[in-house]
Image: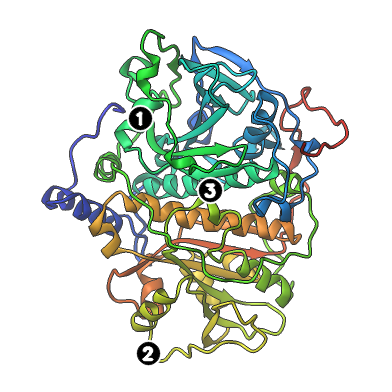
Amino acid sequence: MYDEPVAMNVAATQASSAAEIVLAYHARTKHSLTRYAAGPETLDWDTQPNPFREFAGCARTELELGAERLTTSFAEACTPGSVGPFALTIEAVGKLLELSMGLSAWKEYGPDRWALRCNPSSGNLHPTEAYVLSRNVPGIVDGLHHYQSRDHVLELRCRSSSSPDAPARLWIGLSSVQWREAWKYGERAFRYCQLDVGHALGAFRYAAGALGWRATLVEDVTSAELAALMGLDRTDAFSGVEREDAELLIAIEAAPSTVAAAERNIPGAGESDGNPWTGRANLLDPRPLYRWPVIGQVSDATQGRGTGTSSDFPNYPSLHRTSESCAVDVILGRRSAQRFDSKFTMSADIFYRMLDGLLDRPNAPWDVWNFSPRVHPIFFVHRVEGLEPGVYALPRHPAAAHALHAQLRRDFEWETPAGTPAHLPLVRLLRTDCRIIARTMNCHQAIASDSCFALSMLCEFEPIVRANAWRYRQLHWEAGLLGHALYLEAEAEGLRGTGIGCYFDDALHEILGISGTQFQALYHFTVGRALTDDRILTLPAYPGRRMQPPRETSA
């Protein structure tokens, strides 16, 4: 079932190119007011897939838990050069992984117990896996390791050779176990896996910033090369179990260099010659009830790579933050709100600061991103002081503003609200109470109307996908990255956010006046003051292991 995709659906069979396969998949997996995308008819929560992948037979290295000792502020973590970099050692790598892919807490309600992680995930299903490629990092064996978040350990998959005189280097590879999402969400799961990859990319960027490090996307590697590098193409390790899809590679920079991180030599799989691969992946779901072959097909169609097109960042003024929240507190405290206070009103200053954090400037998380912005939020504002309820747009580059103006409804206002910071490209489209619309468009979920604002991430779509089908993944990553920025910006302001993957795609497009596929909604989000359920217990992420010594600063 897991080794390769089976029969294709009719629309995809008729498609003659990878781009057409992707466009057919996207159309097929839209929710509508009359039907939802194909998914399982029933769920047995007692038999859901194991949320933790591990490899039996690997040497394991236990990592130190020490992130809570970091004193870096959230503002400093977002600003390159504001924190003296930590040395690249096993202790610092442990902090990086703890703050990006590690557990943040356990939750308990009656007989149920589940883990929360620093990286958000659709349905808390966590399809994203992380691999560590190390070279001359003190305390870590050179080679490829799988990060197992439940125990906060590295599993050595394969040693590699490197010159002892070479500088210490670190790369992070991300993959997706698509069945974890498909188990609950069916055919739409591929979309959610890609959004989760964007969230994980953001999680690594903010975690690296807390250590004074930089994170850079590596461009010059194809999907097949990345799969080989991470050992994901090895049938001996994955026979009979859920496969993983190679997604992206991140270069971690602990010290300034005159050579771009993405351009430096990456230890390849060839360096493992003579060093045996070890470990066999565990089976996550022994009783799968459904098959979704279209997921394997769109995965195959989106293999490849892309080259960034971003030019110099626009000349925005420096990002201004008044909060001195500790980065660790923001990252470990992040949660998805389940309910919002429908009477709470957000201040305009907070609203504008959150929007300011979405602009394409050399701050976190956008300095990890090599591509020009293609995702542009449409806001449904409910309760923001001094801002009339209604629909607003934030085009994230000037050309998109012109394209959106041509695509959206002719009767939209396109006016800058009074009091908007001069550099912020926010425009009002329509003055109206849009709570019912927001709730309806988001699969009738109250979180979209009880929040202070909800938003839809409109993405420049079909021309980009037709030019390179791989960009279908990358466009979702950008939306997930934007969502991760919103999560942490909200947390830093004492508020909460929630990502929304369930929305009525074309009904939303129709409301906005979009008739073609030049723009498509890829992700929804909502922000407000969360209401918590005191019946749910919050327990330590790593009971018995966490220490509480004084916080530490960089060198």
Q: In which quadrant of the rendered image does the N terminus lie?
A: top left
- Look at mark 2 in the image and give the residue it sits on: 410
Are circles 2 and 3 on residues that touch, CB within 8 Å? no
Q: Amino acid at mark 3?
A: His
- Quadrant position of residue 518: bottom left
Please report whichever mark, 2 or 3, sits nearer to the chain's N-terminal start: 3
x 66%, y 39%: residue: 99
Mark 1 lies on residue: 227
The image position of residue 16, as x and y in percent, is 12, 51
Disc nearer the start of the sequence (3/1): 3
Q: CA distance from mark 2 to mark 1?
A: 47 Å
- Residue 346 appears left or right of 203: right
Instruction: Tell me if mark 2 has few (under 14), some (14-19) or many (20+) residues whose alpha carbon lies within 10 angstroms of its own.
Output: few
Tell me which residue sits at (32%, 64%) in the image. Answer: 461
- Mark nearest the camera among 2 and 1 is 1
| In the depicted structure, whether residue 173 falls above or below residue 283 | below
Question: Which residue is identified by label 3?
Answer: 199
171, 451: nearer the viewer: 171
Q: Amino acid at mark 1?
A: Ala
Residue 551 in the image, given as x and y percentages of width and height? 84, 37
Does residue 337 show up? no
Which residue appears at 55% of the width and 29% of the height?
A: 169
